[in-house]
Image (cartoon, rainbow, N blue to C red):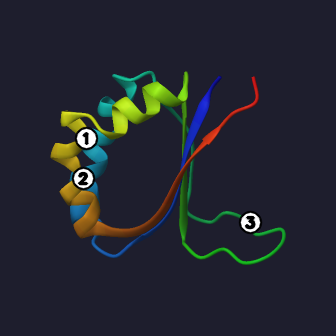
């Protein structure tokens, strides 16, 4: 069953985020992750939205998503992530 990494993000250091973003796609593509959405102005249809950007990545399955997120490659990038932004991140199952 597919899995989705969903992040709501506020970027407060764009230069540091650029460093993170440069390696991000390659790391997750190594784990069959495909970025399906990046939007800096999502339309709120109901309720409240707490961040300015959304990123959604689809993975083949939850195990592969967790392998990518816990990988050495991602660990090398994550300190840039922590310096550059505030985020709420979830992993959720897809409907195949």
Whether 38 is drawn above or below 93: the answer is: below
Task: Classify mark 3: helix, strand or loop.
Answer: loop
Query: Quadrant location of residue 52?
Result: bottom right
> How far is the residue under mark 1 from the one under mark 3?
30 Å
The answer to whether any part of residue 1 appears in the image is yes
Report x, y in % for residue 88: 49, 64
Asked if disc 1 and disc 2 are in contact, CB closer than 8 Å, the reply is: yes
Whether 37 is drawn above or below 16: the answer is: above
Residue at image mark 2: 78
Q: Does label 1 or label 3 sit earlier along the sequence?
A: 3
Q: Does label 2 or label 3 sit earlier along the sequence?
A: 3
Image quarter where the N terminus lies is: top right
> How far is the residue under mark 1 from the one under mark 2?
6 Å
Residue at image mark 1: 74
Report x, y in % for residue 95: 76, 30
Residue at image mark 3: 43
Task: Classify mark 1: helix, strand or loop.
Answer: helix
Report x, y in % for residue 27: 30, 32
Which marked residue is nearer to the observer: mark 1 or mark 3? 1
Image quarter where the C terminus lies is: top right
> How far is the residue under mark 2 from the one under mark 3?
28 Å
Task: Classify mark 2: helix, strand or loop.
Answer: helix
The answer to whether any part of residue 25 appears in the image is no
Q: Residues within 10 Å of mark 3 (few under 14, many from 20)?
A: few
Question: What residue is rendered at 33% in x and 22% in y?
Answer: 30
Whether 48 is drawn above or below 91: the answer is: below
Asked if disc 2 and disc 3 are in contact, CB closer than 8 Å, the reply is: no
Q: Residues within 10 Å of mark 2 (few under 14, many from 20)?
A: some
């Amino acid at each position: 069953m597919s899995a989705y990494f969903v992040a709501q993000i506020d970027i407060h250091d764009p230069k540091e985020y650029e460093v993170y973003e440069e390696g991000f796609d390659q790391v997750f593509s190594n784990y069959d992750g495909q970025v399906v959405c990046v939007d800096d102005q999502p339309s709120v249809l109901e309720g409240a939205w707490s961040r300015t950007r959304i990123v959604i990545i689809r993975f083949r399955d939850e195990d592969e998503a967790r392998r990518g997120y816990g990988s050495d490659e991602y660990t090398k990038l994550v300190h840039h992530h922590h310096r550059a932004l505030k985020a709420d991140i979830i992993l959720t199952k897809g409907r195949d």
